[in-house]
Image (cartoon, grey):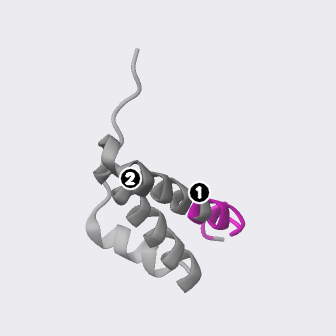
Amino acid sequence: MSAPAPAPIPDAVADFKVRQWTPVRRELELAAANAERSYRLCRSEYTREAREYAIADMARANKHLATIPQRTGGAQ
């Protein structure tokens, strides 16, 4: 039996959650998303060097994101 599909999050809720992030986290999330986008564009053998730079950018952003403490639990 497969797990049910997750319900989509309304845009207003997603915007609210993003506004709660610190400016540093917002910047790092954007950097990771941009690097992932660049990686997807570099598919051919001719863009191998650009793909390697995109991988390095993703790793750098993810490394810094891992140092930010995550909020756990709900409202108290």
Q: Residue furthest top?
A: 1
Split into 4 quadrants, where in the image is the C terminus? bottom right
Secondary element type, mark 1: helix
Q: Which residues are magenta?
A: 61-75
* Prevailing secondary structure class for the magenta stretch in the rendered image: loop
Q: Which residue is mark 2?
A: 39
Question: Is residue 38 found inside the magenta-colored segment of the image?
Answer: no
- In this image, 8 relative to 70: left or right? left
- Asked whether residue 71 appears in the rendered view, the answer is no
On screen, residue 9 above or below 21? above
Percent from the top left, x then y, of residue 39? 38, 53
Percent from the top left, x then y, of residue 57? 52, 63
Q: 10 Å neighbourhood of mark 1: few (<14), some, or many (≥20)?
A: some
| Disc marking residue 12 | none
Are the residues flagged by discs 1 and 2 in contact, CB closer than 8 Å? no
Amino acid type of the residue that numbered disc 2 sits on in the rendered structure: Tyr
Amino acid type of the residue that numbered disc 1 sits on in the rendered structure: Ala
Q: Which residue is mark 1?
A: 59
- In this image, 36 relative to 41: left or right? right
Q: 10 Å neighbourhood of mark 2: few (<14), some, or many (≥20)?
A: many
